[in-house]
């Protein structure tokens, strides 16, 4: 809703750079592929320090010697996808390697 003559004093826009993650895909062989806004596809590895919480997943990815962090809120994925990813991180990576709460 906008009011006549009113200008918002704060505008927050996400920072977008060419390396911003556009898409993250887990292949059937277990490889993770990260697609960025600059059109580059990189193979990444999932760090064991990724974090799983009932409302939040923080994926920590290693790509070409650099660390990428991808926060995923529960409502940013379908319920089934969020649940499956949470389970995969807890069980598939080894429950002692992924931080859970």
Image (cartoon, helix red, strand yellow):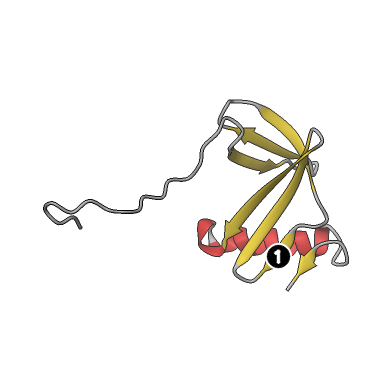
Q: Residue furthest front?
A: 9
Residue 39 % position (x, y): 59, 25
Residue 87, relative to residue 7: is it above or below? below
**Residue 26: quarter of image:** top right
Residue occupying the point 14% across, 56% down:
3
Q: Nearer the viewer, residue 8 or 56?
A: 8
Residue 69 % position (x, y): 68, 49
Q: Residue furthest bottom?
A: 101
Residue 7, relative to residue 16: is it above or below? below
**Residue 38: quarter of image:** top right
Q: Residue furthest left?
A: 4
**Residue 1: quarter of image:** bottom left
Look at mark 1 in the image and give the residue it sits on: 52
Residue 16, relative to residue 57: is it above or below? above
Residue 82 % position (x, y): 61, 61
Left or right of 33? Residue 65 is: right
Residue occupying the point 59% across, 40% down:
23
Residue occupying the point 47% across, 45% down:
14
Quadrant the C terminus occupies: bottom right
**Mark 1 packing: few (<14 Cα in 10 Å), some, or many (20+)?**
many
- Judged from the image, the secondary structure of the residue bearing numbered disc 1 is strand
């Amino acid at each position: 809703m906008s009011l006549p003559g009113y200008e918002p004093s704060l505008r927050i826009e996400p920072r977008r750079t060419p390396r911003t993650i556009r898409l993250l895909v887990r292949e059937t062989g277990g490889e993770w592929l990260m697609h960025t806004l600059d059109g580059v596809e990189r193979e990444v590895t999932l760090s064991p320090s990724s974090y799983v919480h009932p409302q939040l997943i923080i994926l920590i990815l290693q790509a070409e010697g650099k660390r990428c962090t991808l926060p995923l809120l529960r409502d940013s994925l379908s319920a089934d996808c969020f649940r499956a990813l949470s389970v995969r991180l807890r069980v598939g990576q080894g429950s002692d390697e992924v931080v859970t709460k």
